[in-house]
Image: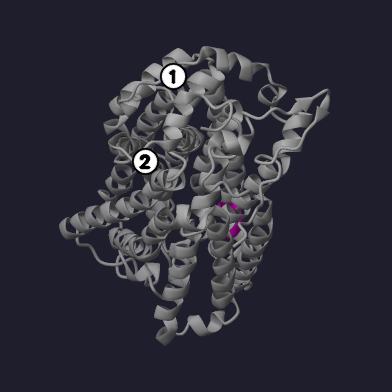
Amino acid sequence: MAKGQLEVLNALDVAKTQWYHFTAIIIAGMGFFTDAYDLFCISLVTKLLGRIYYHVEGAEKPGTLPPNVSAAVNGVAFCGTLSGQLFFGWLGDKMGRKKVYGMTLMLMVICSVASGLSFGHTPKSVMATLCFFRFWLGFGIGGDYPLSATIMSEYANKKTRGAFIAAVFAMQGFGILAGGIFAILLSAAFKARYDVPPYEVDPVGSTVSQADYVWRIILMVGALPAALTYYWRMKMPETARYTALVAKNTKQAASDMSKVLQVEIEAEPQKVEQEAQKQANSFGLFSRQFMSRHGLHLLGTTTTWFLLDIAFYSQNLFQKDIFSAIGWIPPAKTMNAIEEVYRIARAQTLIALCSTVPGYWFTVAFIDKIGRFAIQLMGFFFMTVFMFALAIPYDHWTHRDNRIGFVVIYSLTFFFANFGPNATTFVVPAEIFPARLRSTCHGISAASGKLGAIVGAFGFLYLAQNKDKAKTDAGYPPGIGVKNSLIVLGVINLLGLLFTFLVPESNGKSLEEMSGEHEDEIVEGVETEQPSARNNRTAPIA
């Protein structure tokens, strides 16, 4: 046991993998399943919303969402998520992880259902209602990021902690997959029932009135998995690290973990009092001591997550546009409204099945073997390589015979995003900061990522437009084209690789060892060296 470490924390660090670990993964993971479903399902129905509410009589192409409306519908949930990550991250350190965890889940359930409702029938009222509830849905989802990561890191043992946190995050892959599969099944059922001609044959008849149910059902179903796990979230005890190190109640922490681990654990209240007297365990967020000890770490976690999400979300939200550009999805006018939903969902599900989901679970399998740093560096490197491989010979990929090659390379960028920085940027902030600031710092890092997602979601709408104004989507100014947009994303991935060198390696170390919470810091007014917190190498040396 490390010097000064409480017995209850050491018991968690050295515990063998048990059933409660898997229970925690499922309970926390179902929140992320819902998060991913809710955030990404909107990209399945935006084309349908354009056809239903923005049809222009006599137009050659089906109606599309105006630029400002499209940006709002796609981006408003991210604005809510960013706000929720900051607020609930801070609240999780003030009130405790468990109390706040239930609030976020109920908010997600209520707003998922409400997203499918409308006040009024006009396009303006429907879009306003959708954006309002998706903001608050995002607010609840935002809270799930720091809380799920922190709870899992504080429950896990140090040997397999990375895999457990990554497994929670990997449920995102199943959420994206579930959204696509459900949209396929629903649109196929509606298409079989309402088989109408394509837009070019019958512009009005190609969008049946019942299509309005399709997008509402897809959005509302996201409430189900979150609602099913509410009871189990409320039964989880508060994490021992919060109870002992932040609330200073070692008796309760020992009692809770004795039941979970099924072993006798001594409370040791006198040791907590001794630890509380140390200046190393009392500095605040953004204080001089914090910036000296963790400033570069926080800069590393925020910048890498920000850069990763610009690339990740701009690709994910606008897959359908890229697929259309290379001909993988037929021109909109050759399909009816419901068939278009089916085609978009099928394409996105294929990408999720072949690259997104496997990438997440490769991270789970290898994160505690080769470390966080190596996986993140490798992921950014291959994302950069494959993005440039798509961008530089882009005209080559647009030819019909080369489309499969495009999809393969595009899938590999997603694979290495998920077997790479998309997972590690979530894991590391939950491991390297002190318990009293852990949820807050994770929330700040995650909010930086969502800021990147907003840049990607809004910016890509305009950047990817054709340089020729005659070929742009209705209402959009000319952009730099898909090719140049992919080059920009490649440069962003390269920057992410460089900022990875600010992130410390936490593999195999206890949370207290990483944060330096059990080390004497002040000797006669002079700050001493912190071998585990300050001098962590960013890369393991073979």
Q: Which residues are magenta?
A: 456-460
Front in this rendered view, residue 279 or 461 = 279
Q: Residues within 10 Å of mark 2 (few under 14, many from 20)?
A: many
Q: Is residue 188 above or below residue 36?
A: below
Q: Is residue 351 left or right of residue 410?
A: left
**Circle 1 crowding by C-alpha within 10 Å: few under 14, some 14–19, many from 20:** many
Q: Earlier in the sequence, mark 1 or mark 2?
A: 2
- Judged left or right of residue 296, residue 243 is left
Q: Examine the structure image and report whether residue 457 is included in the region drawn in magenta.
A: yes
Residue located beneath label 2 in the image = 29
The residue identified by callout 1 is 253
What coloring was used for the rendering?
Answer: one colour
Does dot 1 land on a helix, a strand or a loop?
helix
20 or 314, which is in the foreground? 20
The percent coordinates of residue 234 (x first, y second) are 34, 23
Identify the image quadrant of residue 297. top right
The front one of 46 and 149 is 149
Which percent across, then down, holds residue 511? Answer: 54, 36
The quadrant in which residue 358 appears is bottom left
- The amino acid on which the numbered mark 1 sits, given as a three-letter code, is Ala
